[in-house]
Amino acid sequence: MSKHQLGHRQAFIESSDPDESWVPRESGEILLVTGDPYLEEEAKRIVAAIGGSLRTAVDVSEAIHGWDSADVVLVGSDVRELPPRRRAPAVLLGRSAEGDGLWRLAAALGAERVAVLPEAATWLAEHLSQSGSPDPGGTVLGIIGGCGGVGASTCAVWLAQAAAGHGVSTLLIDGDPLGGGLELAVTLEDIPGLRWPDFADARGSIDPGQLRDSLPVAGGFAFLSWPGTRDPVQTPDAGSVAAVVDAARRSFELVVVDIGRGTEGIRTLAWACDKILLLAKAHLKSAVAAARILNELPPVDTGLLIRGNVAAAMDAPLIAESLGLPLSGIVPEVRGVAAGTEFGRLLELGRRRPVMRFADAVLDLHGGSE
């Protein structure tokens, strides 16, 4: 690790003390709906730490009258149904022993986030302390492949490049620790800045300005990548990842996340996204695989991208209809993508007209460019 990286890493560790990050703010009422005493006690402790006001209800019938007036609604994993015509809860609270069932329940209830307690206590405190902020920050746009090798990483790079070209402050996040390092597809230069392992010890709040200034930049956008080396690295836990994404949202107008298809990426990064684009090929096998991935995604605004030529564009509306998703764009087939990925030249390909037209259309559709 360079002295430049070491200095930034130490600054993050020092500034991420949970005791410093839980700064009380003026906030409205937080409603918690659960009959689980453990979840209730954890929530009370966390809300007290941020100086918030918590109202509790043991079940939905007791909570219904104050549901819409609360600034934030939290529900415990013992809640299985929501009151009719009420907004979805902001966070589903659960225990680590509940495993994958938590995310399936969150999707069924339409919850925006999942907090596994006690591990996510620091993240939840930070999240709640900022919920009353008038500025929600930038947009987090996730890209995920419906099957392996479909080109999600390439698409994420091109969207980040296009947004930066429109003057939008943009961050590209590499969400696949087993992908070999997205930075190698962007540039072969050794650009100073922090990578994911440098955030392994981060806790609580990360200063947005520090984050922005510490990251490498290429193609006009900042990027946070896994190292492009064979050396073993330390992996940040879910709390550290959440802290990074929250700081990124406050640092940049647009955060493009290459989610990756692994379970951990979907649990952490996908659930932090405001919008998700699912990328598939215009083939039956790819469409079936995309449907399976779709079942694992959180209940956020999701669109479909189809990669292919003119013939694929003709089939794209049918595939979108079969998946129940709006068609957000057609990713053009471009010669040299494999070599460009291998030799750090994806940004060169991103300046080709078909790619620019595709990226501009997607960004206009999803509010990522002016």
Image (tube, rainbow, N blue to C red):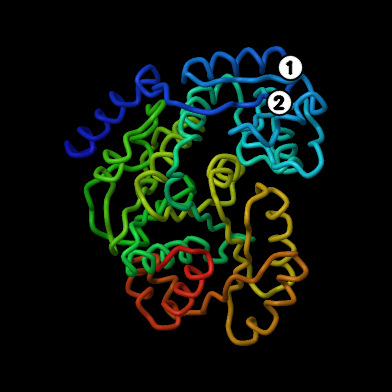
Q: Nearer the viewer, residue 55 or 243?
A: 55
Percent position of residue 28, x then y = 54, 28
> Looking at the image, is 60 positioned above or below residue 172?
above
Q: Is residue 47 left or right of residue 281?
A: left
Residue 146: mark in rendering: none
Q: Residues within 10 Å of mark 1 (few under 14, many from 20)?
A: some
Label 1 sits on what residue type? Asp
Quarter of the N terminus within the rendering: top left
Percent position of residue 87, x then y = 70, 42
Q: Nearer the viewer, residue 279 or 76?
A: 76
Q: Are marks 1 and 2 in contact (CB under 8 Å)?
A: yes
Q: Nearer the viewer, residue 31 or 180?
A: 31
Report the residue marked by disc 1. 36
Q: Nearer the viewer, residue 322 or 58?
A: 58
Furthest residue toward left: 3
Q: Quadrant of residue 253?
A: bottom left
- Local SS, label 2: strand
> Looking at the image, is 27 positioned above or below residue 149?
above
Report the residue marked by disc 2. 76
